[in-house]
């Protein structure tokens, strides 16, 4: 499970559909969705 910050809920949430990804500069990040509102979430770092 990956925790991220939802900009819309203004709260930390456990990401839904969390997937590892990479940023343009090659750093690891995680993409997912907010379980409450469905907004895309993003976190820097590995899963
Ligand atoms: Zn949300």
Image (spheres, rainbow, N blue to C red):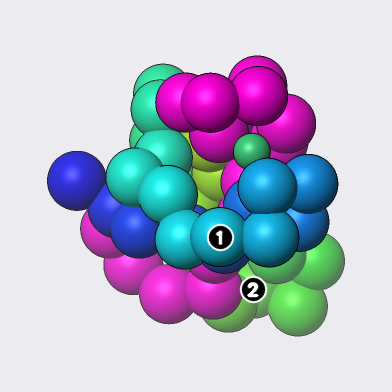
Mark 2 CB lies closer than 8 A to ligand 1: no
Ligand 1, what quadrant?
top right
Residue sitting at 55 percent across and 33 percent down?
Answer: 34
Mark 1 CB lies closer than 8 A to ligand 1: yes
Dot 2 crowding, Cα within 10 Å, few <14, some 14–19, many 20+: few
Vertical order, 29 against 32 (above or below): below
State the residue position of label 2.
26
Which element is circle 1 on?
Answer: strand
**In which quadrant is the C terminus drawn?**
bottom left
Specify whether residue 32 is in view. Answer: yes
Q: CA distance from mark 1 to mark 2?
A: 27 Å
Vertical order, 3 against 46 (above or below): above
Residue 29 located left or right of residue 13? right
Residue sitting at 65 percent across and 21 percent down?
Answer: 38
Vertical order, 19 against 38 (above or below): below
Tally of marks: 2
Residue sitting at 56 percent across and 43 percent down?
Answer: 31
Residue 44 lies within the magenta run: yes
In primary-sequence order, the first of circles 1 and 2 is 1
């Amino acid at each position: 499970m990956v925790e991220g910050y939802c900009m819309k809920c203004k709260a930390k949430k456990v990401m839904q559909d969390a997937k590892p990804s990479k940023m343009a500069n090659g750093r690891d990040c995680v993409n997912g969705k907010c379980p409450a509102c469905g907004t895309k979430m993003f976190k820097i770092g590995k899963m």
